[in-house]
Amino acid sequence: MTGKDNFLQEAYDDDVVKMFLLATIGWGLVAFIVGLLAALQMAHWGFNFNLEWLTFGRVRPLHTNAAIFAFAGNAIFAGVYHSSQRLLKARMFSDLLSRIHFWGWQLIIVLAAVTLLAGYSIGKEYAELEWPIDLLITLVWVVFAVNFFGTLFKRRERHMYVAIWFYIATILTVAVLHIVNSLEIPVSLFKSYPVWAGMQDALVQWWYGHNAVAFFLTTPFLGLMYYYIPKVANRPVYSYRLSIIHFWALVFIYIWAGPHHLLYTALPDWAQTLGMIFSLMLWAPSWGGMINGLLTLRGSWHLVRTEPVLKFLVAAVTFYGMSTFEGPLLSIKSVSALAHYTDWIIAHVHGGALGWNGFMAVGMIYYLVPKLWNTNLYSRRMADWHFWIGFSGIIIYYAAMWAAGITQGLMWRAVTAEGQLMYPDFVETVMRIVPMYWFRVLGGSLFIAGYVIMLVNIYKTIKGAPATAPKEMVRAPAAQSHGVEKGHRKLEGLATVFSVLVVISVLVGSIIEIYPTLNIHKYVEPNSVVQPYTPLQLAGRDIYIREGCYVCHSQMIRKISWDVQRFGPASTIAESMYDRPFQWGSKRTGPDLARVGSKYPNLWHYRHMMNPRDIVQKSLMPNYGWLEHKKTDFAILRKKVSVMKMLGVPYDQETAANADRLAEEEAKAIAEDIAANGGPQNLQSKEIVALIAYLQSLGKRGGE
Amino acid sequence: MKSKHPSLGTNTTALVTFFAAIIFAFIYWIHFHTGGGGLSTTEELKSDLAAIEASKPASQKGAETEVDLNALLSDANALNQGQAVYAARCAACHGQNGEGQIGPNLTDNFWIHGGGQIADVVQVVRTGVTAKGMPAWDTMISGSEINSVSAYIVSLKGSNPANAKAAEGTEVK
């Protein structure tokens, strides 16, 4: 060994791990309950209690953000802080940075909850937060990165274990994704427009969206798997070689897969093809991870029967295997044609979120709480009950959404012998699956019931813990070379080189896909003229985004015969080229709106928005009564139009300078039309009129 | 914690699958993007729509004869079906009893389009007046539903519902 002077001794910082663990447990409950509320609203619209801030368009973004960034995020940080210190044989680089990271992240979550419910949203899925919070996220992430890499550089274990590789990939890639996807120009304190527009924005958004799944919900959790499964089972990882191959394959390939969310849309074919073929290539490397996790237990399967922690971890890895098989399957163009915009995608996501992330986090919680509080788990039986109840919940959820998605997908495409749509009435295809929505409520409730059992169990465990516990110490010599090393083994000692290689791997696919779309005009027919939104329509569009209409309505008629039969000619790139953000959507709970303009009279829209059930008896859509009372902010329109102009939207000087006056004139005409047909008088200053102006413009501004 | 026993069997299977996917990716790309004969999404759509158009029977393209339609006016089944269609689809704009609301009163003697004969009604229901907010129903409901709802509308003539909307169009005696 080494000389005494090199030998360091210090305590691990486990307090911060405890903090992140408790935050995970708490935010998890919030995320799941908000999810249950959203599920209830899908089964019956009335569960929004007619409250503006509880409508589905606001609740769903809150649910997704809470599940991903609050629950999974805190779980990742707990696991990373706990395992990295042990794997690197070093206390975290800075206690202060750890605390800033923790409190900064919780602040972000609270701000997110408040602003999303209040309707401040940039309108991009899983990245809805407005620009000041985006900046804060960047800052806190940098703090995390400095803290992590600081620890990495003072490590006293020369070789980085595979879990650490995955953490490095996570930290660096998430930074790139977040920054590029959040490039936006502020209009006011809580309003901004993305620099990306239309098809370009769609591509960047799903490059981000898919890789949030990859680098926020997959790579860090694989890191946790690589640390906790061998620890709990007390066995070495199955195959070192496999971990090398599947790590680099995932890091290089994942980043290309985003366009599989956009198959048959207006996105250029070459990008769609890349999205599909790279997704298929992901299957084997993903299963490499699953195999490595599961086969680590070879010879000790009996432990799974007796050890609740292992039950959760093994089920989680199995769900990972299912999801990563289903993902490539859904990326095949013909399968996507059936599944896209339906609940099948929701099933897929929840297999991953509840099964893989949820159970992985829960397994880690059951393992870490007794360890860190220096005691035993209060009740193993309760943990077993949690497992079986939660597991049944996931299965019911999954099965219900599969059935719902496939049923609706088949109904959308069904045609009669005469070539007419069999179910031309969209609501009919929604009504058919409402029973499945109730089953989902049941599945979700079971998952939560299991989780509540865990809360009690953990509470009792911590309560029964001794007041003071001895701190776990590192005792290790400084890291040093073990003679000449070759290949990957050598790379594992070179943190900087390793990190640079990771960044290069993710940049290759990113640049190849995004760069060609930077000039969107290249893809637009030179003689197609698209009118920018009038100032009033722009105001209406921002209301559409604020209310989160895009969570139920797509604006993208795919190049698929039954989409065209139902909604009109396929959408083009030109039509959305000024859309910041794009609103192609990802789920059709209501019909596509890309060509709803002038389909109905203004008064129809007014009455429909006030109460959709006055028009379509079985509609699931919320009432939007407040739009009749809230006033349109005309004053800010000049600013909004100038920002758009600066971003390249061809507004003339005249429009920019008089945006508010032009909007008021347009609003007056619409309000008069509503009044003349028997609707209420004097709506011209109200938001409902701006929204109607926007809806009437859809598909009517040229570019077909 | 690194294994000293990598098992080649499982690893090899994973690798073979991986390489198969890579080879497939190349073939797929060549087929669709380098003149390999694969249809673009736009071409695929065009040929699908053409196939649907070709499968439509000739009868659907022409209109039914006057005689057939007039027979519906005394066909209780058709009128019942028409009433159901009306309640589900038309009442939102024309009122529960045809008195008019967003759309015109359908019970009076005034017509904007045609002269109030069942064939005229079928015509306007089928093609709609999309510029004025009357949807075209021929892609949304079946031909027989269009006929029966039109018969139902004609049967409402002179029913004088409450809250009737002021007359629009020209009077037909």
Image (cartoon, coloured by chain):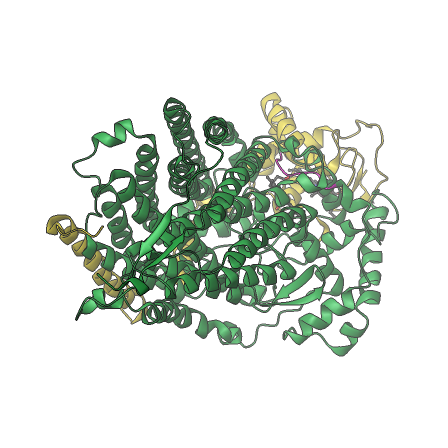
Quadrant where the C terminus of chain A is found in the figure: bottom right
User: In the picture, residue A158 is in which quadrant?
Assistant: bottom left
Outermost residue to the right:
A682
**Colour seen for chain B:** yellow
| Residue at 75%, 33% in the rendered image | B95
Q: Name the quadrant of the N terminus of chain A.
A: bottom left
Pick the residue in front: B148 or A647.
Answer: A647
Taking the magenta stretch, the answer to whether it contains residue A389 is no
Magenta stretch: includes residue A621:
yes
Q: Position of residue A61 (x, y in %)?
A: 58, 47
Q: Is residue A309 visible?
A: yes
Percent position of residue A306, x then y:
28, 27
Q: Is residue B165 above or below residue A693?
A: above
Q: Which residues are magenta?
A: A619-624
Judged by its main secondary structure, the magenta piece is loop
> As drawn, is B168 to the left or to the right of A551?
right
Relative side of A527 to A50, left or right: left
Residue at 68% x, 58% y: name it: A697
Question: How far across and how far down the image is residue B105, in percent?
Answer: 79, 37
Please give the name of the residue rendered at 45% of the width and 74% of the height, measured from the top-left corner.
A515
Residue most extreme to the front = A4
Q: Chain A rendered in what hue? A: green
A634 vs A364, nearest the viewer: A364
Q: How many marks do you count on the picture? A: 0
Residue A417 visible in image: no
